[in-house]
Amino acid sequence: MPEAGISPDVSLWMFDFDGTLSPLVAERTAASLDSACRDMLHRLAAVRGFHCAIISSRQLADLETRVDVPGIFLGGGSGLEWKLPDGRRQVPSAERLDAVRKIRKTVIPEIMEWGRLPGVDIEDKQWSVAIHFRRAAEQARHELATLLDRWQQTRKLRAFRGPAVVEIQLLPEVDKSFGVRAFCDLVSCPLGTARSVYAGD
């Protein structure tokens, strides 16, 4: 049964961006919202009682330039930073900002060194770092995997693997499930009290 004050008819719709609403592309800066997905988001946003969000590891400023659908929530940094349908913004706490600044001082220079491998491209997303190796030859991929495995043993940071990419999350408590919970808090609908759909990694 829903908690008091929570309508059982409320539905939460949550989507990742890359590879879900946007086709995977060789050049990440070329990613764009699929036209059929744009139409779907418009329809969802127009239904009373529906709350719709895009939760991406991209920075919010980047995500905003790729999604032109009014009435939906945009969550950048896997839900650390938000743009609400009315234009208001929610930013991370001072504690999280301080924590990520401290860890970046140490790990970003180390990770950037891997970009010297042929075909390896490092994408700094502030809250995470994506290591793209789509263009890397087999030898460079093997060397990268070895470096990453050794590095993780000392750094203890989580790495999420996708098609030709590894994403290192700089804050251990943050992933897409963190973003889902943050979205539920934003719409005052605790997870499990309403029908929910999530599509993504």
Image: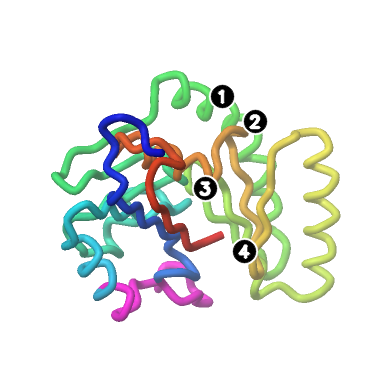
In this view, the residue in front, 118 or 89, is 89
Mark 3 secondary-structure assignment: helix
What is the crowding at mark 4: few (fewer than 14 residues within 10 Å), some, or many (at least 20)?
many
| Kind of residue indicated by mark 1 | Lys
> How far apart are the alpha carbons under marks 2 and 4?
21 Å
Residue indicated by mark 4: 132
Up/down of 55 relative to 101, above or below: below
Q: Quadrant of the C terminus?
A: bottom right
Amino acid type, residue under disc 3 in the picture: Lys
> Mark 4 near mark 3, Cβ–Cβ under 8 Å?
no
Quarter holding the N terminus is top left
- Residue beneath the point at 24% across and 75% down: 39
The residue sitting at 21% across, 60% down in the picture is 45
CA distance separating discs 1 and 2: 7 Å
Q: Of the residues under marks 3 and 1, which one precedes in the sequence? A: 1
Helix, strand or loop at mark 2? helix
How far apart in space, not on screen, are marks 3 and 2 (Cα)?
Answer: 24 Å
| Residue underneath mark 1 | 102
Residue located at (21% from left, 68% from top): 42
Q: Position of residue 41 (x, y in %)?
A: 27, 67
- Kind of residue at disc 4: His
- Residue under label 2: 106
Q: Earlier in the sequence, mark 1 or mark 4?
A: 1
Estimate the x, y position of residue 110 in percent, counting from the top left. 69, 41
Residue at the outermost front position? 1
Q: Which numbered disc, 4 or 3, marks the residue that appears first in the sequence?
A: 4
Residue holding disc 3: 176
Q: Earlier in the sequence, mark 3 or mark 2?
A: 2
Farthest top residue? 95
State which mark lies toward you, 3 or 2.
Answer: 3
